[in-house]
């Protein structure tokens, strides 16, 4: 067709040029002899027509007339046929037009005399193929639903409607991986199709559902009253998707978690942001126990931004040598001799101060940074062990990610060789949860470490579901009895459990050590039961390596570490007060508020030489300020203007010689069923305490905070 068009156009132009030249010579004006070349047009199979300068049809062949209709008059005007005048179409060569439900490539050629030659080449097959390919690119091939590429533009269109709110619901199937692992991917694919069918049947015509990938789905709800409409839909989705499925004679049960974000009408939220907000709400729903829905709240985004900033800082921490190891001694209950040192990591953050592991280790595990951090811990612990007596072991905790890495055995071997430490002096601690994870390399790595000559200990024994089977699966050297059996709950029942674990350890030839020893009474019971070793705040808090060099055997706190007395300061005052704690809300909100208070206090007060400590309990808030009198008074005045404080009660404001708190520190205690990051309740009665009791209690809490995950300190 293109060849026909080129030949035809060339012939017409050649003839026209010759004719025009003769006319100009003989008569001085152009003439058009249509009959001389129209025969060429009529014999072409390509629909072809000649239009005058004003768009009137001058002549056309039969294919053109059959396509456009054999009607006279205005129906054959160029503008009527194609919607634009000829000169406008000529500016866009090879324009595609639709006539009689087919697509044509309209090639327009200008001729002398301001006439136009129009040829229509049928490209319907090509255009339809492109349309089909585009639609396939926006469809999920398994379920037939829209995919992410189609869903995001739909959300953007919904947000453009200033009259109505829209809602995005992000869905994630619960326990889908177990279906794939146990029944196979064919059953998993069939399940996804059935879920897609149920979701489609649940929605209104105006709603849009998409599969984003894997077991993730998304719904766009438009035109419903928000947030009630989204909440009703979320509850319905959880109920419908959670019903049982019958697939290939298998009864399959899965659930679904839903995150919801509302796009208010008239606001400038973009599609990507709204989807991200729904995804954050989905994570909250999954953390809350799955099979439920959660709405996005701004605190989630703030927490996510804070988490991202912390992750970036964490990536730089290794390069800038910001980590440090503290050590907590372990003693033999038979003679009080120091038998080991457990390595506990600390982070000297440039702005947040000294951070405890509970504040960053979970993030390191989630991002995979725990592997290089863990390698540094092993190397540093082995190097520090070289400074102690040969009969003192160094204990290092190893995470699930490290244990599944094929580099762990080589890392340990290299660290021992470089430090010149005997393999028997390194004790690797793993938790029951690691054993329960069924990691593919777990047992092979443990046997590789044992072959090196290192010792292996099971940490937090008794908190898992199959402790005894783990002891049978691998010959551990030591069992670490979890601190919950030492200092919490039913004393008599716990004592019986500790006695049983001790007997099991003796029968299996494994040493036993109790964690979290805080009182003389606990220590005496452990001795009476026959437990081999102990560690905890009563013996010593974790301390830097230099302070371990002055340790001597003994049971009581402070007797093992020689802590230098701080120098006296002139014009040093201590102010102690407490107030009602007005911080309420969800766990992440409270955590972020507590962290923000700590950062603000540290930044503002350090500038004027004020240090101290803060403690949050379930109902009260206590703070100690230490520094120059004028600075302390100014800080306290500012505190009383803070809306987060109510019913402020001043306990003491008096001169002191030395500071009790060299830097800003914080502890948070509350009921664990309300806030999962709190390890236990604080039974300290602030309302009945004096200033000295509050200061002593805070020192003890902050010193022992290594024993639980929830404490925040800097």
Image (tube, helix red, strand yellow):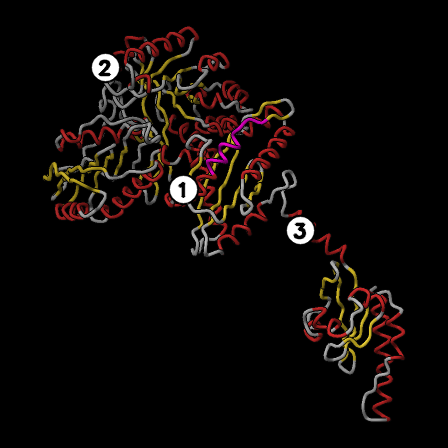
Q: For marks 1 and 3, give the one nearer the viewer.
A: 3
Question: Can you say whether 513 is above or below 298 in the image?
Answer: above
Question: Can you say whether 140 is above or below 104 in the image?
Answer: above
Q: Quadrant of the C terminus?
A: top left
Q: How far is mark 2 from mark 3, CA to CA?
A: 75 Å
Question: Quick one: label 1 or label 3, which is nearer the N terminus?
Answer: 3
Percent of width and height locating residue 351: 32, 45
Percent of width and height locating residue 530: 32, 8
Question: What secondary structure is found at the residue carrying circle 2?
Answer: helix
Q: Residue 403 colored magenta?
A: no
Within 10 Å of disc 2 (Cα), the crowding (few <14, some 14-19, many 20+) is few
Question: Quick one: label 2 or label 3, which is nearer the N terminus?
Answer: 3
* Magenta-tinted stretch: 234-245
Question: Quick one: label 1 or label 2, which is nearer the N terminus?
Answer: 1
Is residue 549 at all visible to an observer of this figure?
A: no
Q: For marks 2 and 3, give the one nearer the viewer.
A: 3
- For the point 46% across and 35% down, the residue is 235
Q: Which residue is mark 3?
A: 134
Percent of width and height locating residue 340: 35, 20
Question: What secondary structure is found at the residue carrying circle 1?
Answer: helix
- For the point 26% across and 36% down, the residue is 666
Q: How far is mark 1 from mark 3, CA to CA?
A: 38 Å
Q: Which residue is mark 2?
A: 521
Q: Main secondary structure of the magenta part?
A: helix
Asked if the residues shown at circle 2 and circle 3 are in contact, with their CB atoms under 8 angstroms apart, the answer is no
Dot label at residue 199: none
Within 10 Å of disc 3 (Cα), the crowding (few <14, some 14-19, many 20+) is few
Dot label at residue 307: 1
Is residue 379 at all visible to an observer of this figure?
A: yes
């Amino acid at each position: 067709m293109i060849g026909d068009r080129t030949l035809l156009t060339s012939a017409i132009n050649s003839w026209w040029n010759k004719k025009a030249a003769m006319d100009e010579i003989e008569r001085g004006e152009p003439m058009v002899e249509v009959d001389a070349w129209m025969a060429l047009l009529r014999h072409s199979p390509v629909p072809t027509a000649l239009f005058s300068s004003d768009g009137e049809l001058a002549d056309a062949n039969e294919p053109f007339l059959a396509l456009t209709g054999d009607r006279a008059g205005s129906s054959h005007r160029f503008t009527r046929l194609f919607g634009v005048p000829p000169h406008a179409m000529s500016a866009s060569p090879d324009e595609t037009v639709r006539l009689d439900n087919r697509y044509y490539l309209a090639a327009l050629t200008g001729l002398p005399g301001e006439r136009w030659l129009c040829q229509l080449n049928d490209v319907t097959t090509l255009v339809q193929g492109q349309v089909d390919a585009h639609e396939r690119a926006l469809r999920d091939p398994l379920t037939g639903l829209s995919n992410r590429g189609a869903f995001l533009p739909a959300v953007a269109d919904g947000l453009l409607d200033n009259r109505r709110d829209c809602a995005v619901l992000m869905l994630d199937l619960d326990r889908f991986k177990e279906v794939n692992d146990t029944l196979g991917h064919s059953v998993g694919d069939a399940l996804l199709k059935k879920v897609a069918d149920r979701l489609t049947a649940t929605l209104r015509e105006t709603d849009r559902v998409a599969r984003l990938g894997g077991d993730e789905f998304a719904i766009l709800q438009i035109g419903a009253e928000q947030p009630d409409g989204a909440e009703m839909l979320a509850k319905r989705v959880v109920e419908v998707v959670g019903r049982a499925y019958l697939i290939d004679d298998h009864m399959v049960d899965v659930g679904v978690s839903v995150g919801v974000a509302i796009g208010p009408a008239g606001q400038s939220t973009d599609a990507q942001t709204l989807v991200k907000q729904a995804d954050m709400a989905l994570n909250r729903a999954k953390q809350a126990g799955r099979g439920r829905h959660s709405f996005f709240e701004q605190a989630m985004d703030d927490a996510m931004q804070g988490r991202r900033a912390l992750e970036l800082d964490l990536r730089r921490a290794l390069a800038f040598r910001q980590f440090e190891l503290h050590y907590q001694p372990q003693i033999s209950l038979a003679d009080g001799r120091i038998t080991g040192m457990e390595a506990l990591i600390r982070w000297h953050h440039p702005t947040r101060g000294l951070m405890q592991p509970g504040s960053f280790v979970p993030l390191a595990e989630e991002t995979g940074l725990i592997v290089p951090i863990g390698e540094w811990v092993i190397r540093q612990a082995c190097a520090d062990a070289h400074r102690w007596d040969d009969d003192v072991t160094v204990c290092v905790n190893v995470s699930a990610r490290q244990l599944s890495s094929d580099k762990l055995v080589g890392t340990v071997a290299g660290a021992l060789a470089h430090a010149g430490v005997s393999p028997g002096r390194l004790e690797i601690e793993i938790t029951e949860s690691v054993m329960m994870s069924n990691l593919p390399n777990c047992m092979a790595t443990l046997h590789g470490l044992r072959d090196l000559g290192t010792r292996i200990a099971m940490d937090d024994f008794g908190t898992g579901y199959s402790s005894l089977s783990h002891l049978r699966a691998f010959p551990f050297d030591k069992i670490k009895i979890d601190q919950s059996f030492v200092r919490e709950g039913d004393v008599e029942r716990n004592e019986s459990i500790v006695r049983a674990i001790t007997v099991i350890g003796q029968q299996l030839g494994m040493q036993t050590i109790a964690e979290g020893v805080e009182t003389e009474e606990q220590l005496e019971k452990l001795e009476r039961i026959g437990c081999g070793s102990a560690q905890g705040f009563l013996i010593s808090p974790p301390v830097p390596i230099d302070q371990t060099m002055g340790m001597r055997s003994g049971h009581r706190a402070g007797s093992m570490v020689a802590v230098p007395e701080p120098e006296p300061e002139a014009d040093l005052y201590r102010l102690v007060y407490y107030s009602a704690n007005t911080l309420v809300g969800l766990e992440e909100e409270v955590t972020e508020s507590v962290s923000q208070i700590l950062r603000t206090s540290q930044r503002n007060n350090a500038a004027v030489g004020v240090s101290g400590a803060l403690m949050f309990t379930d109902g009260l808030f206590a703070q100690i300020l230490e520094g120059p009198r004028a600075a302390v008074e100014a800080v306290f005045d500012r505190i009383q203007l803070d809306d987060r404080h109510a019913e402020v009660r001043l306990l003491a404001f008096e001169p002191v010689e030395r500071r009790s708190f060299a830097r800003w520190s914080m502890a948070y205690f509350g009921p664990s069923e309300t806030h999962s990051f709190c390890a236990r309740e604080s039974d300290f009665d602030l309302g009945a305490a004096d200033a000295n009791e509050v200061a002593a209690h805070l020192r003890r809490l902050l010193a022992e905070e290594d024993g639980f995950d929830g404490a925040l300190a800097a």
